Image (tube, rainbow, N blue to C red):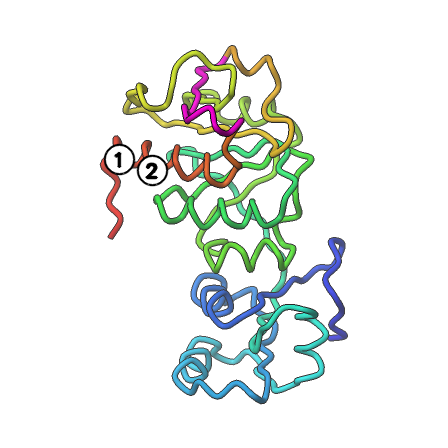
Amino acid sequence: MDLKIYRKDAYYSYTLGAFPTIELLKHHPQDVLKIIVHSSFKNQEILNLIADLKGNKEMIINDKLINKLCQKDNCYIVGIFKKYSSHLDINNDHIVLYNPSNMGNVGTILRSALGFNIKDVAIIKPGVDIFDPKVLRSAMGAFFSLNIEYFDSYESYVRKFPDHQKITFMLKAKETLQNKRFENVKTSLIFGNEATGLPEELLNEHSLLISHSQAIDSLNLPNAVSIALYEFAKQKNRNFQ
């Protein structure tokens, strides 16, 4: 295959670095196309692990191709894989990201989601391309353990999951996260775009504010999501083992 710098319309994407490539091999071996290794990479333990996980998938040494795909990133192992689709589990709690636009933020949120045992993430279009290597790298391998599904609108998400309790995080909310007691029901935690937040009409849902000092105007999106997930997980007594 003639590998090129990532394009959204390509049928494949790639992981940059050893750890995300290992997670790809563990969780989506059927989608792996090829593993590329830089000749200067000498960690035999990692090379042996990749060799064990890859099965009959091709592993080659190609410094020029590594440098081409990684560009300015420092990486020595690249995993090439076919893009795939996944769907949210109706029996799980969800994170809903409304029009997220920053690839690094989305990757960080995916990592936090898995860290707090939420494995289903909805993205309301328009939103970032989740297969962009920048998203994959900032997710640090968490991407491959999650169900991620795009929706054309918030309404289409609600139609598919009408029984989930919808919790929106908004600066104009009257109730604070610190005072919220989450019910023992399937829940959707909904967060807005980094710059514009959520539409005003979503104040009609059960809305929460993460209160903080007046020294700042707001928290950045990954921090807000992580704080909300921590409190949610603590109340739900999630097992982090």
* In front of the other: 228 or 163: 228
The percent position of residue 224, horizontal first and vertical second, equals 46, 34
- Residue at point 66%, 34% (across, down): 125
**Drawn side of residue 223 relative to residue 69, left or right:** left
Residue type for callout 1? Lys
- Residue 91: quadrant of the picture: top left
At 45% from the left and 50% from the top, the residue drawn is 111
Instruction: Assess whether mark 1 and mark 2 are in contact (beta carbons under 8 angstroms).
Output: yes
- In this figure, which residue is indicated by the disc labeled 1? 234
Q: Residue at x 52, y 80 (%)?
A: 56
The local crowd at label 2, few if under 14, some if 14 to 19, many if 20 or more residues have their Cα within 10 Å, is some
Question: At which x and y percent is residue 155?
Answer: 60, 21
Examine the rendered structure and indicate whether residue 36 appears above or below residue 141.
below
Q: Residues within 10 Å of mark 1 (few under 14, many from 20)?
A: few
Element on which disc 1 rests: helix
Q: In this orientation, which residue lies closer to the viewer: 55 or 12?
A: 12
Residue 60 percent location from the top left of the image:
60, 85
| Numbered range of the magenta stretch | 205-217
Q: Which mark is residue 230?
A: 2
Kindly identify the residue that appears in the image at 28 percent across and 24 percent down: 184
* Element type where label 2 sits in the image: helix
Q: Nearer the viewer, residue 80 or 190?
A: 190
Report the quarter where the N terminus lies: bottom right
Q: Is 95 situated left or right of 59 in this image?
A: left
Q: Is residue 85 magenta?
A: no
Task: Tally the numbered discs.
Answer: 2
